[in-house]
Structures are given as structure tokens and as C-alpha cells.
Amino acid sequence: MSAWAPAAPAPAEPPPTRGGSFLHDTWTVFLREAAPVVREPAGLAFTMVQPLLFLFFFGPLIGGSGTFPGGQSPWQWFVPGVLVMMCLFGPMMSGYNLLVELLGGSLERLLVSPLNRTAMLIGRTLKESAVLAAQAVLIVALAVPLGFDLHPVGVLAGLGLLTVFAVGLGTLSFVLAMASQPNGELFYGITQMLLFPLLLLSGVLLPLDSGPAWLRGAAAVNPVAYIADAERALFAGRFAEASVLHGALAAAAVAALGLALGTRSMRRGV
């Protein structure tokens, strides 16, 4: 009998867990989504055209129209409204990029990777929120020379509230994109049907206080109206107003609904 014996095989490495670290996967997806924006900043600048037109062309008209509710200055009232409008046109339409990947088949290749599916959703949403925050900082900086009274703490709180709302809108947009397969017509139809009623019934561009009762009643069930009021209070440094609480609850509700539906859709598969 030989004394030689084959060496015991080395223990196999444990298979990678699906998703690994959730935070790591979220950061990976965030970088993947943010890379095209960094490489091609012209696309980001193009998305700024509309809010800049409102700021420089529509803002002076608002400024000459008299006083605003609560005795606010026109710019103090108008600038937060422009930021809420940017949130509607940005994160609410962010599902379009996901829809393109779904229809093109590139998302299927990402789904077979070990990345956590919920992290894919959160990473995409955080990228949209980061873009919105950067655009909002630029708008505020440009508005100061026009007459906007800067309250740094209030602006930071307002941007935080807007980010929470953007997370909710972005995830709801992704859910709609996933439900719109295979042709995407449902996504375009619903977003176009909802976008302008939500905008016009929020008092973002003009005060609703002088409108008819039925219009103010319709605005009362629009969460965007509460967020716009909260943004105006925060940007003016009025933290103790009830509108801040109402806006925070509206933003949290939209975010919770979006994350719940988005996580469920991603785990069930697209």
C-alpha cells in the first residue's frame, strides 16, 4: 500500500449571493446611470432650457403682477414653484429611459447579473434625484440676483423634501414603464394625461386662491399642491407652518407608495 495520498481538494468558494451588499449594488447602479450624464453634460444642459425660460421670461411677468398670498415677494413665491415643476417634468418622465432599455432588451442582460433587483430600482431613482438636486441648486443660484431672498437652511430643507418627492415620482414612473410593455403606449398616454392636470392644479405657476371653488376643490386632492405650499414656506424660512407638515406627509406618502409598488414589480420580474 502506497503512503502517497492525493491532496484534499481545496474547499470551493461559496457562490456569490444574489445582490451581495444592497448598498454596494445601489451605488453600482447609481454610477452606471450617472456615467452618461457626466460624459455628456450637454444633455443635462438641454433639460435646463425649459426651467430657465420660465425663470427669465415668465418670472418677470409674475413679478409685475402684484402681491402674492401671505405677502410673499413674487420671486420668493415663484422660484419654489419652478423647482416643483422641474420635479414633475424630470423624475415623473424618468421611466422613459427604462422603457427604452426594456424594449431594446438591454435590461434583460442586467437582470441576469447578481445585482439586487431592488437596488436596480433605488440606484436609478437616486440618480434622477441627484440630477434634480443639481438643477435646483443652479436655479436658486441664478434667482438670487433677480431678487430671490436666500435662506440657506430653508433651501436645504426644501431640496430634501423635493428629493423625497422625486424618489416617489421616479419609482412610480418606473412601475408604469414596466407595465407598459411591449409597445410603451400606456406609459406615454398616462404620463401625458396626468402631467398637466397635476401641474395646473398645484398652483405652481399661478395662485389658486382667487380661483373658483371647484378648482380649489380639485387642487385639494392634488398632492403636488401641498408640496408646492411646503416648498414656499421652507424657502422663506417659515418652518413652523402647517403647510410644511402637510407637504412632508404628501411627499412621504408618494415615496412610500412608489417604493412599495416598484420593489414589488422588480421582484416579480419585468
Image: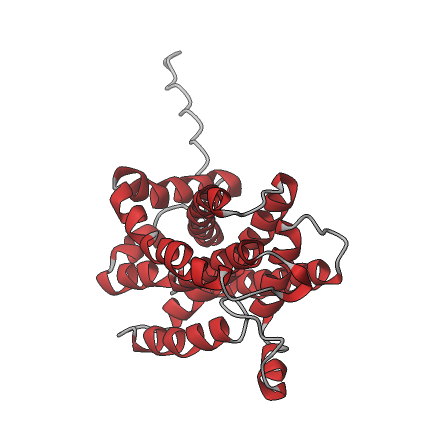
Given the current orientation, which residue lies at the most extreme top position? 3
Of the pair 218 and 189, the residue shown nearer to us: 218
Task: Give the side of residue 171 with respect to residue 47, left or right.
Answer: right
Residue nearer the viewer, 35 or 142: 142
Image height check: is 106 above or below 9?
below
The answer to whether residue 217 is left or right of residue 48 is right
Question: Which residue is located at x 46 percent, y 35 percent?
Answer: 14
Residue 20 placement (x, y as % from top left): 48, 40
Q: Is residue 31 above or below residue 177?
A: above
Query: Where residue 88 sits: x, y (%)?
Result: 45, 63
Quadrant that contains the N terminus: top left
In this image, 110 relative to 69: left or right? left
Front in this rendered view, residue 46 or 250: 46
Quadrant of the snapshot with the C terminus: bottom left
At which x and y percent is residue 176?
A: 41, 70
**The residue positioned farthest toward the left in the image shown:** 104
Res. 171 in view: no
**What residue is shown at x 32% (from left), y 54% (from top)?**
49
